Image (cartoon, coloured by chain):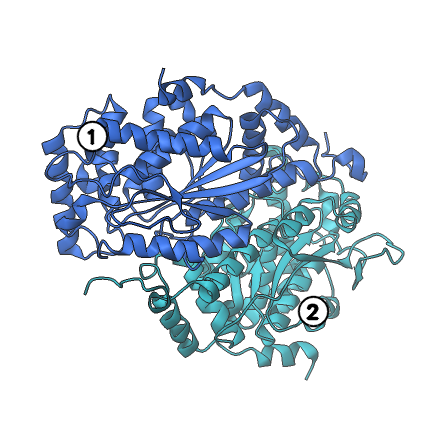
Chain colours: A blue, B cyan
Amino acid sequence: MTLLESALKEIKPVDPALLAKAQERLDMLTKPKDSLGRLEEFARRFVAITGNTRPTVEKKVIFTFAGDHGVAEEGVSAFPKEVTPQMVLNFLRGGAGINVLSRHAGIEVAVVDIGVDFDFNGAKGLIHKKVLRGTRNIRKGPAMTRDEAVKCLEAGINLAAEYAADGAIFGTGDMGIANTTPSSAICAAFSGASVEDVTGRGTGIDDARLKNKINVIKDALSVNKPNSNDPIDVLAKVGGAEIGGIAGLIIGAASRRIPVVVDGFISTAGALVAYEMNPVIRDYLFAAHNSVEKGHKVMLERMNLRPFVDLDLRLGEGTGAAIGISLVEAGVKVYNEMATFGDAGVSEKDK
Amino acid sequence: MTLLESALKEIKPVDPALLAKAQERLDMLTKPKDSLGRLEEFARRFVAITGNTRPTVEKKVIFTFAGDHGVAEEGVSAFPKEVTPQMVLNFLRGGAGINVLSRHAGIEVAVVDIGVDFDFNGAKGLIHKKVLRGTRNIRKGPAMTRDEAVKCLEAGINLAAEYAADGAIFGTGDMGIANTTPSSAICAAFSGASVEDVTGRGTGIDDARLKNKINVIKDALSVNKPNSNDPIDVLAKVGGAEIGGIAGLIIGAASRRIPVVVDGFISTAGALVAYEMNPVIRDYLFAAHNSVEKGHKVMLERMNLRPFVDLDLRLGEGTGAAIGISLVEAGVKVYNEMATFGDAGVSEKDK
């Protein structure tokens, strides 16, 4: 059995009895029942995912996977391709949005080169998991071979193993100029939605470029004919290296009972690839924020995930996940640190 | 001129030139334009409110005002009245939801007795600003005299002065069994909306109690006839001590150019009282979360405020404000700490 097969096989649904046990404790805390809303849901789910009835968050890591995309040559992005390695170096120096928001929430950022078309020469702090130097242009043929796609997934699974710890929570992030294009293609391939309904402006393209982007995605789907019943085929043909890394990280985390907070559009495309391989994975995921990209909602609904931060973010990198991790942690702290009615001598609700 | 009059007079609209200047810097940072959405808005507004073009958040305080309500005797709440002082003691011991969420975000909690029907005997850590021992039953007559209402407002204004500092940000919170009842009454009085449309289940009452609560509020409005053109009259007749304290804190903060993150339904009723006295106050407010209480939306729309946390919270105490303060601070950090395109050697958008 391959690493991928065995990780997928190890993923088990969370135990509903643990959700109920966690709710029992939440209902003893000094607040009206359910009044902390989704923070209580986060606590319940954290208990059920980890299997620890008094869990604490001990290790917070966001994995920002970087990769290039051959389809960038089709003019689908507002930024030139060289921005991918430039931003990776910015991450390593701590100057990007993900660095600031992660510092704010006490989160480590793991920057992963999984497919950038640039030689980083062993840059300090960078995690070297390069599978290829940029994907090939999906308008003309497959982005990757099936073997390369599996290597991306396994790089993610290995990272989950390397960073696994008691009390860990992971977040996903991405960097890759043009990567909303393969993400929309993945969304359309699995959901059957029209390309127009799942394609947005990415980093900010105008109407003419948006029209071109839609045509490029339509061509990519008709040239490659990805098989939606075979998620690795979809990832290889119209996906990207960072999307595969994110999918693999999620598979690895779920196989080790580690919760994962999923960032926006690109990360959700990665989560969807993982979910299509084993829908039980949904039990381990928290959807952080509502992206401005319209395909995002289609994918979240397919996985029945409801985001909780409404800040009009569309940066990626893991920025929404950083905020999301802090809120999941807040839920776990509520669960652990609030006084019970008995302890605090507070009267309960009238019968 | 009284303290209230002079504070109201000192409140000036924020300077749009400062908003534009802040946006200039935001547009130089290594991210697509506007891609950090509302975090950028928070940074812009923080600059404009404080008048400091490189502001940092140096002091975070949530003021949780506690008061009792004579109308509790009408059976409008799911909890008995003694819970108000019990919860105040729970706040002082650090065991309540607001304590946990404030610790998580590095926020100080200032617990203020402004109108609890209990003798705390100088309890340690409690801020003693008691104006009255519980309001009177608004179904039968005014909650407070006009003089008492002004004293509540001035207690809040004085607290803002005592806690004022460079880089300060305040949050509001409340504790008071039955206080959704006066909040709905305030909402109906100013907005003209029907009582049914602005009255919810508070801490969790059943259908029969909800029906009773609606009748109580209708009676309170017809018995007291609050004058919606005279916000102090509304506060005195159908409000509450903690609602007045919150309104006063907001007035004091705005007069000193300190941003205020407003919690849910009760805090927003306080914000509305302040807003009706001087609508410029809106410039200084951040609406944290979307409360489950349906009158909340009516008041936010009246002030043109858009909340940003969607966690189904309905606890009060300032819990939504704690999360909100952390997100406003995140916006300010993005503004200060992110690298510019020039500094980071990152290529800008294609022209």
Q: Alpha-carbon neighbours of circle 2 within 10 Å: few (<14), some, or many (≥20)?
A: some
- In depth, the one of A22 and A178 nearer the eye is A178
Residue for badge 2: B163
Residue for badge 1: A145
Residue at (62, 28) in percent of width and height:
A23
Q: Amino acid at mark 1?
A: Thr
Q: Using the image, determine if residue A119 lies above or below residue A273.
A: below
The picture places residue B336, in percent across and down from the top left corner, at 47, 66
Q: Are marks 1 and 2 in contact (CB under 8 Å)?
A: no
Quadrant where the N terminus of chain A lies? top left
Q: CA distance from mark 1 to mark 2?
A: 62 Å
Q: Using the image, determine if residue A170 lies above or below residue B182.
A: above
Residue B292 in view here: no
The picture places residue A296, in percent across and down from the top left corner, at 32, 41
Q: Alpha-carbon neighbours of circle 1 within 10 Å: few (<14), some, or many (≥20)?
A: some
Residue A144 as seen in the image, left or right of residue B103: left
> Pointer 1 indicates a residue of which chain?
A
